[in-house]
Image (spheres, rainbow, N blue to C red):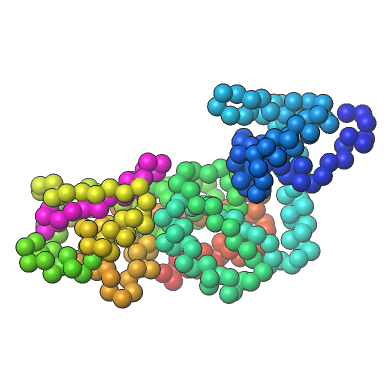
Amino acid sequence: MGNPSRLHFSLDLLKGFEAAARHLSFTRAANELSLTQSAISREIKLLESRLEVRLFNRIHRGLELTDAGLALYRSVSEALRLIDRGIEAVTGPAGGVVTITTNVPFASFWVVPRLPRFAALYPDISVRVAATNRVVNLEREQIDVGVRHISGGTLPPGAIELMTERLFPVCAPQLLRRRDRPLKKPEDLARHTLLLYAPDDMPQHWSDWPRWLEAMKLAGPAPAATLSFGHYDQVIQAALDGAGAALGGNLLVQRHRDGGRRVAPFGRDRSVAIGGRYVVTTAAHAAERPSVRVFVDWLLGEAATG
């Protein structure tokens, strides 16, 4: 690599390589950068040709970085971070883009409904929500803030507790009015359909009927029927339509309370803290960015005020 002319690369070329190396996938890199998979592949081939080194090994399950590729990834990743910080310094302390990841239900039912308030307070900060039920490596995937659910008692290093979720049964009003099967006390649930949240890519936690029933000391017969859904919004819609009773959290069902479309048949005094906690983690690469600190402080304030 003695010829200096070979060391002049476009920023787009380096961004394509960085995304491919971070995801270990040309397809996911292409999706992130709004390019085609073939365009990313061509960029990598061009970069490898100009550097005269192989950056990736193609394996049957995807890609892996070579030693040269890993060394370049570390340098390019840090360089792009410095560029981002420089741009933020020029555009002002409140500017920039903050990327947050959390699970799909929490994103849909808690984060997204609140974002208009954040936008009104901080119009210079853009927020990107990367909702996924898998555990994301914040550094590797260039995510600034993670809101994660934990079931244990010890906080992960650097994490801040956001909230504890409490669960209670919710249903449509018409279930309470059924003469053949009234729903007036927890024991009546045995004669009703229970709606279950059971995604393939996420362990059950706060949507957990067995633990709620155990906490209520209800070890009686199995429910009349169950319906399982892979998405929490489907559970919510089924409850709204009167298909059965669902377990809802005080923080995740409040957007549907308006208009009396759903009720808590036994009151909120029957809520149980069995769902663990949500915690906020800030990536090391983003911890000092003013826009990220503003966003995390806002999240904590929203949680404190309900």
Give percent across and percent down for residue 129: 54, 56
Q: Quadrant of residue 263?
A: bottom left
Whether residue 71 is situated above or below residue 226 in the rendered picture:
above
Whether residue 278 is situated above or below residue 254 in the rendered picture:
above
State the quadrant of the C terminus: bottom left
State the quadrant of the N terminus: top right
Give percent across and percent down for residue 259: 31, 76
Whether residue 169 is situated above or below residue 46 in the rendered picture:
below
143 displayed left or right of 9:
left
Q: Residue at x 62, y 58 (%)?
A: 98
Q: Residue at x 59, y 61 (%)?
A: 127
Q: Quadrant of residue 166?
A: bottom left
Give percent across and percent down for residue 53: 78, 26
Q: Can residue 123 be seen at all in this image of the molecule?
A: yes
Q: Can residue 269 be seen at all in this image of the molecule?
A: no
Q: Residue at x 62, y 29 (%)?
A: 63
Q: Is 25 part of what is drawn in magenta?
A: no
Query: Which residues are the magenta region?
Result: 188-205
Q: Residue at x 13, y 46 (%)?
A: 222
Whether residue 52 is situated above or below residue 164 in the rendered picture:
above
213 displayed left or right of 220:
right
Give percent across and percent down for residue 170: 25, 63
